[in-house]
Every structure is written in structure tokens, then in C-alpha cells.
């Protein structure tokens, strides 16, 4: 007895595609991908982005980037020439990057085959080290501080002194200008300490309640003509983060590195939850981080 053949499903009718994006042109994949990721992140709170960037001087580096994002935001995705218009916007940005010597070529060919882990490394590079941070660095001016911090992680180092009755009690000084932290890399020692949850590493890195460390001098910095003005004890807060970028690229070190060299290699298994808080929820709320 023969069984009736089942009719193959019409797959073409079941496929659902997302909104159109940038059409590849002349090795544009690196810029297409980074613009797409940035657009998704920015439009989560587009009003905040627009409020910060719309007042930038026309023609300035970050104003050019703002226009690219804003023009796409105002486009109707249903328009027949949507991808062509996006391509023109991207190409204008690409020419601007070339004119500002942020990139060297407009159409350098690359291999079409890239392994996933290499592609992730490339994306991390372009979002943390390459064209976007270089574009933002052109705007290191007071009036652009919020716009620059939108894409970069900045930190400072603070000195704290226990103070004395004579000088009015404890006091603090900022010992460094804002410093950019290009990479957020988790390594084997983080895994050993927290056993996998990336959220715990983030709490350690971004906490506003860091534990001070003893300074080498161990004495207050308030000195005049060689005479100490304060008898207090100095401690330091290293790398206190004051801004977190819209996209936080986290680079995981070599996951195959053995955690116990004597018993062989053991692969690390990191847990990336859907939501990561920059500190414990209580502390983040207390210090106004979120």
C-alpha cells in the first residue's frame, strides 16, 4: 500500500524579512554593519540622541554623523528607493571620513569569507577603536562633551583624604583629566572570581562605590613650600567611570585558556543576561546611574 506524498510547504510565503537596510557597495560591509548596529541602539531613545546632537555646529564631525542617522529616521521604509537613499547617505559619510583622514580608502577590497569570531572582533574594533571614536575625538571641545561621551567610556582618578580638624575634615581632588577607556575585556581571572556571570564583572567595573586603594605617599597632597597643611591619610579611587557609551562592546579573552593549567584546558562559559545593570540595582538607583 502506497502512502500519499505530502505536498511540500510553500516556503516563500512563510518567509518574513525585517526592514530594508544598506545595500552593499564597494566593500562597504564594515560601515553598513556598524551603522546598522548604531541605528538600532540609538533609536531605542532617539529623542535623547536628537536633543544632544541637534545643536552641534553644522559641518562638525559628529553633526555629519547625526545627519546620517536623523535622515534615516525620517525616511519612510516603504518607499521604493529606500535602500538606494540609505546607500547615498552612507556614501556621503564615507567620503567625509576619507576627507578627514579617518579612513584611507573608499573601496579597498577584502575577502568575502570571514569566520564569525573574526567578524565579531572586526565589529568590536570598528565600534571601539576605529572610525566612530576617531570621529568623536575630532570634537574634544567643552560644548561637545555630551555628544562625545555618547560613544565613549570615560573615567577619572580621584584622591581622597581623611582630613583633619584644622583643615575642615575630609576632602577630594580630581587628579587626572577624563581618560578614554577603549576596551572592556573580560579575562580568565574574572571568570575565576565570578564563575561566569558577565553582570558581576559589569558591577565591578562601573560601580560608583569603589573601594579606595592606598597611595604610595599615603599623605595628603595639600602642601605649601614643603610644609604639610593637612595631617590626614590619602587614598585613591582609580578609574572611576563617569560615562558609558550607547553601545558597550565587551571583548571576551581566550575562552579556551585553561583555568587550571595542571589539569588541562577548561573552556569558560560566560552568562550574558538580557539586561545588565552598571551596578547593583540599589547602588545604581542611589547614585543616579539609572
Image: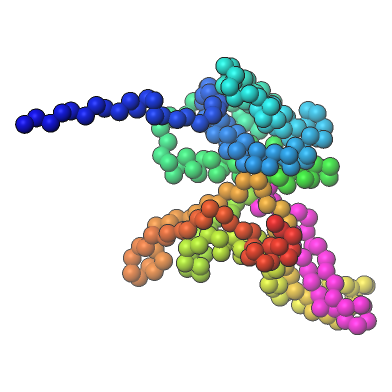
What residue is at 63 percent from the left and 23 percent from the top? 76
What percent of the width, then of the height, locates residue 16? 45, 30
Left or right relative to 168: residue 249: left
What residue is at 79 percent from the left and 45 percent from the top? 145
What percent of the width, then of the height, locates residue 211? 68, 72
Residue 4 is covered by the magenta coloring = no
Q: Which of the 4 image quarters holds residue 15?
A: top left
Considering only vertical position in the picture, is 38 above or below 280? above
Considering only vertical position in the picture, is 29 above or below 223? above
Q: Quadrant of the N terminus?
A: top left
Q: Which of the 4 image quarters holds residue 47?
A: top right
Which segment is the magenta one? 152-181
Which sits in the foreground, 163 or 82? 82
Residue 173 is covered by the magenta coloring = yes
Report the number of numbered marks: 0
Which sits in the foreground, 143 or 13? 13
What percent of the width, then of the height, locates residue 51? 78, 39
What residue is at 49 percent from the left and 43 percent from the top? 120
Q: Quadrant of the C terminus?
A: bottom right
Q: Residue furthest top?
A: 80
Amino acid at each position: 500500500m502506497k502512502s500519499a506524498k505530502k505536498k511540500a510547504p510553500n516556503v516563500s510565503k512563510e518567509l518574513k524579512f525585517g526592514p530594508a537596510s544598506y545595500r552593499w557597495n564597494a566593500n562597504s560591509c564594515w560601515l553598513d554593519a556598524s551603522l546598522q548596529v548604531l541605528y538600532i541602539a540609538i533609536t531605542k531613545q532617539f529623542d535623547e540622541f536628537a536633543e544632544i546632537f541637534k545643536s552641534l555646529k553644522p559641518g562638525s564631525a559628529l553633526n555629519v554623523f547625526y545627519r546620517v542617522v536623523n535622515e534615516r529616521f525620517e525616511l519612510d521604509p516603504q518607499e521604493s528607493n529606500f535602500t538606494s537613499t540609505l546607500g547615498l547617505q552612507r556614501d556621503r559619510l564615507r567620503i567625509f571620513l576619507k576627507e578627514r583622514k579617518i579612513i584611507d580608502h573608499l573601496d579597498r577590497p577584502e575577502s568575502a569569507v570571514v569566520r564569525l569570531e573574526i567578524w565579531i572582533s572586526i565589529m568590536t574594533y570598528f565600534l571601539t577603536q576605529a572610525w566612530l571614536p576617531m570621529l568623536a575625538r575630532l570634537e574634544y571641545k567643552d560644548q561637545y562633551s555630551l555628544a562625545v561621551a555618547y560613544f565613549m567610556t570615560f573615567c577619572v582618578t580621584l584622591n581622597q583624604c581623611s582630613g583633619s580638624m584644622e583643615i575642615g575634615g575630609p576632602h577630594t581632588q580630581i587628579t587626572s583629566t577624563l581618560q578614554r577607556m577603549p576596551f572592556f575585556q573580560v579575562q580568565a581571572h574574572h571568570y575565576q572570581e565570578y564563575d561566569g556571570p558577565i553582570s558581576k564583572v559589569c558591577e565591578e567595573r562601573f560601580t560608583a562605590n569603589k573601594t579606595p586603594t592606598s597611595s604610595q605617599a599615603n599623605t595628603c597632597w595639600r602642601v605649601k613650600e614643603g610644609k604639610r597643611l593637612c595631617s590626614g591619610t590619602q587614598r585613591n579611587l582609580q578609574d572611576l567611570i563617569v560615562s558609558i557609551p550607547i553601545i558597550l562592546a565587551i571583548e571576551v579573552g581566550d575562552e579556551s585558556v585553561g583555568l587550571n593549567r595542571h589539569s588541562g584546558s577548561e573552556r569558560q562559559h560566560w552568562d550574558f543576561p538580557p539586561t545588565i545593570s552598571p551596578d547593583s540595582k540599589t547602588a545604581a538607583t542611589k547614585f543616579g546611574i539609572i
